[in-house]
Amino acid sequence: MLKCSNCGRENKQGEVICVYCGSPLVDIIVKTKALENTDFEENMPKWGSARPSHRIRLYVLNDSGKEETLSYETKDIELLVIGRVDPATNEAPVIDLSRFNALEKGVSRRHAAIVRKDAALHLVDLSAANGTFLNGQRLVPDQPRILRDGDDIRLGHLVIRIAFERT
């Protein structure tokens, strides 16, 4: 068992991030810019529909304060990795947030993913250095959480609003 130096709770051997508070349990070489204060509370209950329509829209604010929309056909979604370009290999995830200053806002190269599971869409944290938050709740890495219409996703300091487009 590994004892978390932040909260003092015991974690299973092999864990790299505390499942209780999200603090690193081991020294990790992190290429993502580490940010201060990404664990602030913003918890707002959301009650949107969990039934995705034919398209999912992701609304992201660009640096000029204008909202940009990324849109995907839900029938085509099996796994959509969200992150930024890897400068060493030039590989980019399906949802590349580089143009939104993702590095400066604490977004990892492979930060999170939207996956289809049991006819619903889920958000999964991919052990991102600055955490993945769904409506203000920090996600436990590799644990899928259902996405609903109107949900807010925060990756480091970058916020994305989810909308299921209605026909």
Image (spheres, rainbow, N blue to C red):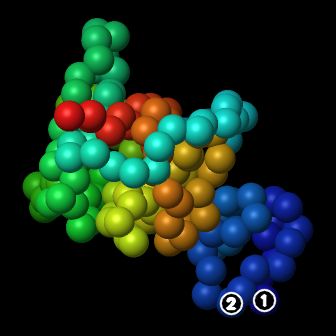
Quarter of the rendering occupied by the C terminus: top left
* Residue plotted at (46% across, 50% down): 50
Give the labeled residue for mark 1.
Answer: 1
Is 12 left, or right, of 6 in this rendering?
left
**Viewer-closest of 29 and 62:** 62
Give the labeled residue for mark 2.
Answer: 13
**Which of disc 1 and disc 2 is earlier in sequence?**
1
Is 10 left, or right, of 129 in this rendering?
right
Q: Quadrant of residue 115?
A: bottom left
**Viewer-closest of 60 and 105:** 60
Q: Position of residue 4 (x, y in %)?
A: 79, 70
* Residue plotted at (43% across, 39% down): 149
Give yes or no for contact between labels 2 and 1 (Cβ–Cβ under 8 Å): yes
**Secondary element type, mark 2:** loop
Please, is residue 111 above or below residue 33 in the view? below
**Viewer-closest of 145 and 153:** 145
**Amino acid type of the residue tagged 2 in the rendering:** Gln
**Amino acid type of the residue tagged 1 in the rendering:** Met
* Residue plotted at (32% across, 28% down): 59
CA separation in Å, label 2 and label 1: 5 Å
